DNA sequence: AGAGTGGGTGAACGGCGTTAGCTAACGGTG
DNA sequence: CACCGTTAGCTAACGCCGTTCACCCACTCT
């Protein structure tokens, strides 16, 4: 939630409003998991709260905006989970932390199917790119960036602590090179473009693996995808030069 | 559609029914792309056809079943597209064919955002595993297997033509080994378990890459994901020992 | 010719998002 | 204190949606 703590400021009206807003978001969260994404109805949320549906329009201009806020909250919740897993690693070597964070990502995804679907599936705003506009207008944009930052920062630390082999700039296709440069310029630390490409590649593998598992697209081959996940993580770790004994998967 | 061709058999009633059924499926397809997955309503389909909504219940027991049929049709359409791309490769070397099929997969996905979301996103039946039951009851199961078979067959051919290095059975985690064995037993040809694991790994990368692009989860880094896709395919190809000049990405 | 069935209809139920208009309480000001 | 604008809630309503029901007509079969 990340911003629900400071509720004791302002007039009584403002406090009441903030409380109701928080309650709406919590209720929406609960309705989502109990009724699924299709059952996430304004009327259901209002019913749960003992309110009438139109009352919610005092807090959100439309159902879509409420869902977007929920997505932002879920991103924050996921990030908290990831950071907790990362910070629990002792000693705090970046390689082990990256691994722990990746496992925490899968763990959250598999224990929060529905929420994960909302964040990373097609139901989200992802579909229909809308002309690549929508820069940072959406409230889910900031937590989304925070989420990416968790992995990106760890990746950078892994490389800075002990560089692994990456393709030279010249080996990358010029168009890819240009895009990676543009992206790199937005980040706090400058890294070789090859690192960025390896990071993306690793992230794609992690995302692909978890998405396939959660969306059921691995059932055709695997009853329990966890060993395959560990196998993939082992390959990724090898590519990143992450050494050390393979700690048990939780 | 794969089964809409033989429409001139049976009684006149049967033919009329088959025609209407086909028209429903085509209309649903059209409504899907024009109105999005949310707009795919029974009433909208019926309206488009000049029918009343309850009439559709003579053909499908519920909206969900109709959507499932649509998913099956889309799988078939995608498979046709993939096979066409595969068969257009000359000379028909498996490596080049696999590459062409992967590119065709991305091409179809990027030009059919909404349909892809229905097939591979969370909106599909993927979410909520339902106790891993639902073996082959769903009409989308057969085309789904066909889809997997396209890539699996190519992969097998690549390996059989020129084996690439794969982990030995003993190197795989025992649980993974057991699952791959079970999966392998269901396939027509027996292959080393290591090949199966490499196949899964490659498929995960392809799926992850395309999903991220279509669902907009690469926009944080890349404006045009195609160069990254080509880069990933190059890495995958290298892992599979696919040589040959890098044909232009069409 | 008559019976039966299959494909259509309109009406209706409950639920949905959303809007409009109303009311009552709150918060600050004379 | 009274007063008045703002704010948060309500009910009613509109037009969608999926789905069910009762009905009806046309075709098919005996």
Image (cartoon, coloured by chain):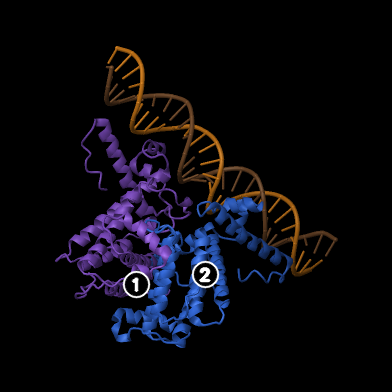
Chain colours: A blue, B purple, C orange, D brown
Q: Nearer the viewer, residue A214 or A172?
A: A214
Q: Do badges 1 and 2 share one subunit? A: no
The residue lying at 61 percent from left, 56 percent from top is: A56
The residue lying at 42 percent from left, 51 percent from top is: B39
A22 over D12 or under it: above or below: below
**Quarter-wise, where is residue A81 in the image?**
bottom right
**Quarter-wise, where is residue D13 in the image?**
top right
Q: Nearer the viewer, residue B227 or A89?
A: A89
- Marks 1 and 2, how far apart at CA: 27 Å
Image quarter hosting the C terminus of chain B: bottom left
**Residue to which mark 2 is pinned:** A104
Q: Nearer the viewer, residue B244 or B54?
A: B244
Q: Nearer the viewer, residue B198 or A211?
A: B198
Camera-nearest label, 1 or 2? 2
User: In the displayed image of the protein, which residue is found farthest to the front?
Assistant: B170
**Residue to which mark 1 is pinned:** B225
In the rendered view, does A9 fall on the left or right side of B128?
A: right
């Amino acid at each position: 939630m990340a911003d629900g703590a400071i509720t004791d400021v302002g007039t009584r009206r403002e406090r009441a409003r903030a409380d109701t807003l928080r309650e709406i978001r919590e209720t929406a969260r609960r309705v989502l998991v109990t009724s699924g994404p299709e059952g996430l109805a304004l009327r259901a949320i209002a019913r749960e709260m003992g309110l009438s549906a139109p009352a919610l329009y005092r807090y959100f201009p439309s159902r879509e905006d409420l869902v977007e806020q929920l997505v932002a909250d879920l991103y924050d919740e996921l990030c908290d989970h990831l950071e907790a897993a990362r910070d629990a690693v002792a000693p705090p070597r970046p390689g082990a932390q990256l691994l722990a964070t990746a496992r925490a990502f899968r763990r959250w995804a598999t224990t929060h199917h529905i929420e994960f679907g909302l964040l990373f599936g097609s139901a989200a705003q992802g579909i229909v790119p809308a002309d690549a506009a929508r820069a940072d207008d959406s409230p889910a944009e900031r937590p989304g960036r925070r989420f990416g930052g968790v992995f990106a920062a760890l990746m950078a630390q892994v490389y800075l602590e002990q560089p692994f082999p990456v393709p030279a700039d010249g080996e990358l296709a010029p168009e890819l090179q240009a895009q990676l440069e543009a992206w790199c310029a937005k980040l706090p630390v400058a890294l070789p473009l090859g690192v960025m490409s390896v990071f993306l590649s690793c992230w794609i593998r992690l995302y692909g693996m978890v998405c396939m598992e959660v969306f059921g697209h691995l059932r055709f081959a695997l009853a329990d995808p966890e060993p395959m996940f560990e196998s993939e993580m082992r390959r990724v770790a090898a590519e990143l030069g992450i050494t050390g004994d393979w700690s048990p998967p939780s």
